[in-house]
Amino acid sequence: MTDRRVLWQANAQFVADRVLVGGDLDLFDNAKAARQRAELIDSGVTHVVDCRIEWDDTAAWQDTGVRYVRAPIDDAGQRVPAEWFEVMVSRVLEWLEHPDAVVLTHCHMGINRGPSLGFAVLLGLGLEPVEALRTIQSVRPIAYAYYAEDAVEWWVERNGLDPEEADRHRTAVADYREEQKLDVVHVIADIRSAERDAGSA
């Protein structure tokens, strides 16, 4: 029997029973993009949150039965406001109240924006920050989730954590980052090189 949680075409991974994080549909191969979309639908995806500011896949998801929502932010190392996390996580958690809902949060490469929102969703589901980061990176090693620290600040405020507990979580995330030493610049360079090759093929 095929495990619908293991995706072979789509650029995404399950990080919880009904939450995935990842990258976008293939930009250079329409047939592959169609296969990726079909696999996501077959895996139960009912909602897609697109964090890209540079593309819009409304047409790609039209008439599929999947609810496609844009939550565009840049990926330039800026601070992501707590309001963005609050609005989007609240929506995702509301969707997940339906037992059949499965939500994908994605960006272009699936390194920073989509995983950062997925990280915040995991916080909203009750995981602590390091546990959430470890969960994501265990199945998607390239997911740095650059904006996770901003999500932690949102989570601290949302839960009214006292300063000592908040600092404990900030320090734990910083220590975890140091242990991981993910070379995100190298990862991005490799993906961009592969995209250039695909675009010129």
Image (cartoon, helix red, strand yellow):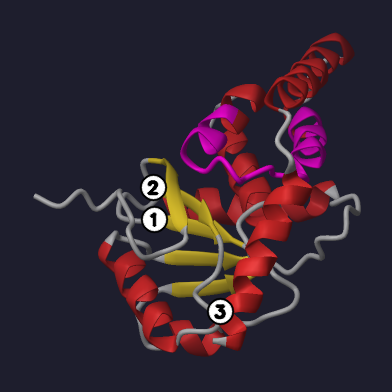
Q: For mark 1, what is the residue?
A: 102
Question: Mark 1 is on which residue type?
Answer: Val
Q: For mark 2, what is the residue?
A: 18
Query: Which of pointers 3 and 2 lies earlier in the amino acid sequence?
Result: 2
Bounds of the magenta segment: 134-157
Q: Secondary structure beneath disc 1?
A: loop
| For residue 192, side relative to residue 137 (left or right) | right
Question: Mark 3 is on which residue type?
Answer: Ala
Q: Are marks 2 and 1 in contact (CB under 8 Å)?
A: yes
Residue 131 quadrant: top right
Q: Nearer the viewer, residue 120 or 74?
A: 74
CA gap between label 1 and label 3 equals 30 Å
User: Does the magenta segment cover residue 91?
Assistant: no
Query: Which of pointers 2 and 1 lies earlier in the amino acid sequence?
Result: 2
For the point 73% across and 59% down, the residue is: 189
Question: Mark 2 is on which residue type?
Answer: Arg
Asked if residue 170 is positioned above or below residue 185 in the image, the reply reads above
Q: For mark 3, what is the residue?
A: 198
| For residue 107, side relative to residue 47 (left or right) | right
For the point 82% across and 46% down, the residue is: 82
For the point 82% across and 41% down, the residue is: 150
CA gap between label 2 and label 1 equals 4 Å
Q: Are marks 1 and 3 in contact (CB under 8 Å)?
A: no
Callout 1 crowding tier (Cα within 10 Å): few <14, some 14–19, many ≥20: many
Asked if residue 151 is positioned above or below residue 28 in the image, the reply reads above
Can the viewer see residue 125? Answer: yes
Can the viewer see residue 51? Answer: no
The C terminus lies in which quarter of the figure? bottom right
